[in-house]
Image: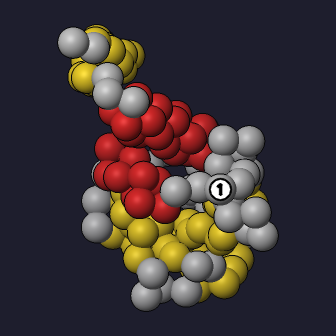
Amino acid sequence: MSVWTKVQTKVLAKAVDMKLFEEALRDLELTLDYTEKEIKNSFGKSRVDAMLKFQGNKTALGIVRNAEGGIDLLGDTWRSGIVGDKQQDKLVNMMSQVYQKHKLKRDLELQGWDVKTVKKGNKIELEITQW
């Protein structure tokens, strides 16, 4: 059964770097379509700043920028193909984790560190070295 919700996390609550966020979304095969300003299905609809697309396909999910420059996820994961029904929390946590990875990697590289992403099974590790 479908559920229309609004989900927030601390990581994405304020001052989100949208360039990094969009890079992070690509890790999850997601993109933002800023031309689509409304998301809907038979259970609800909302105005959004951008629609979330999965593998190029429209979803009933979108983002809204809040007053602090953060992101709220709106909509319904039902039939999205990204996560299961009623798993908006899981999706926003996945988005938060990949965003943190990209932000940490960028911040370390700006400080002169060499950062490599290493995938070990279901885990992603960052190898950090400085010469």
Judge from the rendering whether residue 126 lies leftward or rightward of residue 63; answer left or right.
left
- Give 23 or 104, whichever is nearer the viewer: 104
Quadrant housing residue 41: bottom right
Residue at 27 percent of width and 14 percent of height: 130
Q: Is residue 101 visible?
A: no
State the quadrant of the C terminus: top left
Judge from the rendering whether residue 66 lies leftward or rightward of residue 95; answer left or right.
right
x then y, percent, for residue 64: 65, 71
Which SS class for mark 1?
A: loop
x then y, percent, for residue 26: 32, 52
x then y, percent, for residue 18: 49, 61
Colouring method of the image = secondary structure
Q: Is residue 47 above or below residue 72?
A: below
x then y, percent, for residue 77: 57, 56
Quadrant housing residue 55: bottom left
Residue at 44 percent of width and 36 percent of height: 107
- Give 13 or 8, whichever is nearer the viewer: 13
- Give 98 or 43, whichever is nearer the viewer: 98
Residue at 37 percent of width and 63 percent of height: 31
Q: Which residue is mark 1?
A: 15
State the quadrant of the N terminus: bottom right
Q: Is residue 100 visible?
A: yes
Residue at 71 percent of width and 54 percent of height: 14
Q: Is residue 76 above or below residue 47?
A: above
* Few, some or many residues within 10 Å of mark 1 (<14, 14–19, 20+): some
Which three-letter amino acid code belongs to the residue tagged 1? Ala
Q: Is residue 34 above or below residue 13?
A: below
Judge from the rendering whether residue 115 lies leftward or rightward of residue 70; answer left or right.
left
